[in-house]
Amino acid sequence: MPEIQPHADNAIVWQDDRLYLLDQRFLPQRTEYLGLDSAEEVADAIHDMVVRGAPAIGITAAYGVVLGARQAFRAQAEGWREALAEGLNRLAASRPTAVNLFWALDRMGRLIAELGAGDPEAALLAEARAIHTEDIAANRCLGELGAGLIEGPTQVITHCNAGALATGGYGTALGVIRSAHAAGKIRQVYADETRPWLQGSRLTAWELHQDNIPVTLLSDSAAASLMAHGGIGWVIVGSDRIAANGDVANKIGTYGLAVAAKHHGVKVMVAAPTSTIDMSITSGADIPIEERNPSEVLSCGGQLIGAPGVDAWNPVFDVTPAALVDAIVTEKGIVLAPDADKMADLMKDN
């Protein structure tokens, strides 16, 4: 295992011809990297939550295509595309809601179709690295744009983890928060704990603490009460898929947070790259919502906390209607009070 400095900005690392993922299941107690050598291993890592967050899933899948193509070419140089098909199918089936996964696979697929004879690895690796680099640049751009909407100094709430760990680096929602904090516009961040995987508690708080940004952990059910006390300027979240009308799929609990924000006059900002916008989906009603094993809700840290014999409903995401969103911030611009016409205008050149 090569020496890699454990940091949120190093969550996805290509080194020594292998893909290394900072295993987010064990943060913050342990900082361990998992080395991967095949598309199937990458698909399992995505499904098992070693890596999560829509942009990070897309980047990881792109590197998974590189690994799959390497294996396929070594096994069948003349028919490597056919040999790669199963690996691509495994990657596509790893998580259903995050559209960046399919966006990245489509982009890699277009390149595969254009390649001639010979070993495809170098060209595919260059494309995967480009996807990675472009995502970081997009995050920094949308971070600055989103920070420009904030009149500070103020306090903000964020939900789940939409930081460097969930992206190629810097972050979407946390990218806005990082930029706004650097500009003196945010004095305090409240991070929802985010059941059942506790990404806010384990990941967001860890990231912000690493960067010396004041963060306080917040039970998901306490957010509305905090807003009632005043002083919260924005709710800032990321997204796993945005529909053509501006409806937003994000970590379960985002919808309730947005409803509470509307009641208390707190603005809601969704920060995401344009690769998260799915113009083929008319509204949030058409977004597939992943449901995971009830055991994730019924247990914590391997210990059963639910009553034996009781079932649990475990949707990973919910859909926040566009009417509850004040701004969608992307690297290509800001959409205020989003609707279908404004989203189409933003995406007309994509």
Image (cartoon, grey):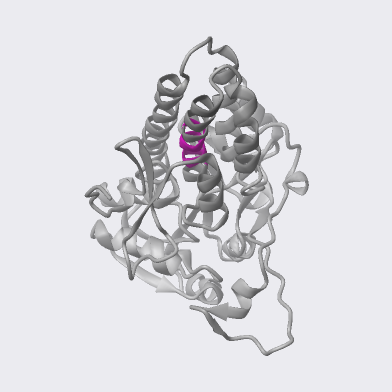
Q: Position of residue 44 (x, y in %)?
A: 55, 51
* Displayed quadrant of residue 6: bottom left
Q: Is 246 displayed left or right of 123 in the figure?
A: right
The residue at 29%/64% (across/down) is 214
Point out the residue furthest to the top here. Answer: 116
Q: Is 349 or 182 nearer to us in this picture?
A: 349
Q: Position of residue 236 (x, y in %)?
A: 48, 54
In the image, the segment drawn in magenta is 58-66
Judge whether residue 292 can be spotted in this image.
Answer: yes
- Specify whether residue 63 is painted magenta: yes
- Relative to residue 243, is residue 349 depicted above or below? above
Q: Is residue 266 left or right of residue 130?
A: right
Is residue 229 placed above or below 119 in the rendered structure?
below
**Does the segment drawn in magenta span residue 348?**
no
Identity of the residue drawn at 42% across and 37% down: 142
- Residue at screen point 72% across, 46% down: 287
Q: Could you tell me which residue is drawn at 65 percent across and 48 percent down?
A: 97
Q: Is residue 143 left or right of residue 85?
A: left
Residue 231 seen in this snapshot: no
Say which quarter of the image contains residue 121: top left
- How far from the left and from the top, in percent, is residue 67? 47, 35
Q: Position of residue 165 (x, y in %)?
A: 40, 51
